[in-house]
Amino acid sequence: MRTQQSGHIINISSIAGIAPSMGWSVYGAAKHAVIGLTEVLADDVRPFGIKVTLIAPGAFRTNFNNPDSLVLSQQKIDAYAEIRSSQERFTTTSGTQVGDPSKAAKVMMEVTDMAEPPLYLLLGSDAYARAFGKLDLLASSYQQWEALTKSTGFD
């Protein structure tokens, strides 16, 4: 891509990398890392004419959350009952996810043909709602702690 001065890298993260859910800390951390990598990669390869897009999908009707495709701890510790319950609820949604994987694939292909593709692209109405919920949370928290944040500079 560098030699031909063109190309397009698409990295797949998850809405969980932006707004993680209880019980999925390792997954959320891994997907958050993909976001950070993609943001900097876009800057690194821009001079070579290479485009980069980060896809953050919500729930799509795939086998992803089928109970047989997830590996959950078999050791049940009472202190983690709420987390276990959250994980079990997740597995019960298999087959009812709002996203259509065929439509997602079509959108990803469209993005590769765009002259100015997005750096960030949410896929699914659920991802859109979760992302804006996170934006609101961040804005509120940053504003709430503005004075303390700014108190760390030299006087």
Image: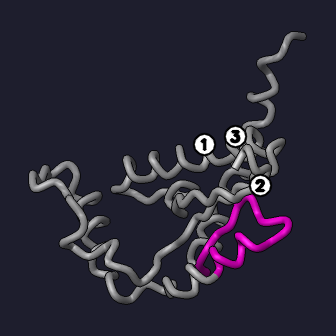
Residue at image mark 2: 6
Residue 37 within the segment the image draws in magenta: no
Q: Which residues are magenta?
A: 107-125
Location of the C terminus (image quadrant): top right
Identified by mark 1, the residue type is: Leu
- Residue furthest right as drawn: 155
* Spot occupied by residue 113 in the image (x, y as percentages of width and height): 75, 73
Q: Is residue 19 shown left or right of residue 24?
A: right
The span from disc 3 to disc 2 (Cα, nearest Å) is 18 Å
Q: Which residue occupies the extreme front position in the image? A: 3
The reply to whether callout 1 and callout 3 are in contact (CB within 8 Å) is: yes
Q: Amino acid at mark 2?
A: Ser
Label 1: element kind: helix
State the image coordinates of residue 39 (x, y, percent, origin top left).
69, 46
Residue 2 vertical position relative to residue 24 in the rendered view, above or below: above
Which residue: 46% across, 79% down? 60
Residue of label 3: 40
Nearer to the camera, 109 or 95: 109
Q: Which residue is mark 1?
A: 37
Q: CA distance from mark 2 to mark 1?
A: 20 Å
Residue 88 image offset from top left, x and y in percent:
24, 70
Rendering colour mode:
one colour
Residue located at (13% from left, 50% from top): 77
Q: Residue at x 68, y 43 (%)?
A: 41
Give the residue at x 75% y 29%: 149
Q: Amino acid at mark 3?
A: Val
Quarter of the rendering containing residue 57: bottom right
Furthest residue toward left: 75
